[in-house]
Structures are given as C-alpha cells and as structure tokens.
Amino acid sequence: MPISALLARIRRLIPKAKDQHYDEIVRNFGVGTLRPPPTPMSDGELARAIAEFLKDSPSSETVASLRRRLDPSSGV
C-alpha cells in the first residue's frame, strides 16, 4: 500500500485536536522511522494501533510502539 493511501486512512482516525500526532506520523514516514506494514492491516487493526499511539503525547517511544504495531517484525 502506498504511504499516501495509508496516511489517508490514518488521517481519518486522528481527530483534528490531535494534529501533532498526525504530524509526527507523517514526519516519521518521511525520515524512514515508520514504514507501511508489510502485509495489509484491517481498519480495526489500524484503528487499535492509532488509538494506542494517541494515548500519550508523540515521542520517540510512542513512535516506536506504533512501529511495532505496523510491523511486528521490525524488532524495535
């Protein structure tokens, strides 16, 4: 799945009040910290991963947690 399509799905899951979270996700895709999942994620799986990411303020730790959810084989 192209990153743009994944980001569009993620944008629908993040409320405007949490724009900092979305910006952090976009930034981390841009620098290569985050990559699209190797296999397609269902809407439910993606929603759970994003909900977990939104619980805390964006940080390297929360990005690492999201990375593990997007790609469990990443080992991060």
Image: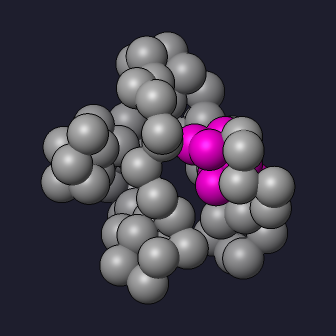
Can you give x and y, in whole percent of width and height, for residue 23 in the image?
Answer: 38, 72
Can you give x and y, in whole percent of width and height, for residue 10 in the image?
Answer: 35, 43
Asked if residue 67 lies in the magenta stretch, the reply is yes
Residue depicted at x 51% and y 64%: 34
For the N terminus, the quadrant is top left
In-image side of 53 versus 56 (left or right): left
Q: Taking the image as drawn, is residue 27 in sight? A: no
Can you give x and y, in whole percent of width and height, for residue 47 in the image?
Answer: 50, 27
Q: Nearer the viewer, residue 43 or 38?
A: 38
Q: Quadrant of residue 26?
A: bottom left
Residue bounds of the magenta highlight:
65-71
Residue depicted at x 64% and y 51%: 66
For the C terminus, the quadrant is bottom right
Secondary structure, magenta segment, majority class = helix
Q: Quadrant of residue 29?
A: bottom left
Q: Taking the image as drawn, is residue 29 in sight? A: yes
Q: Quadrant of residue 8?
A: top left
Can you give x and y, in whole percent of width and height, for residue 35 in the image?
Answer: 46, 59
In-image side of 31 versus 48 (left or right): left
The single residue placed furthest to the bottom in the displayed view is 31
Residue depicted at x 62% and y 44%: 71
Against 17, residue 12 (above or below) is above
Residue depicted at x 55% and y 73%: 33
Q: Nearer the viewer, residue 18 or 40?
A: 40
Asked if residue 45 lies in the magenta stretch, the reply is no
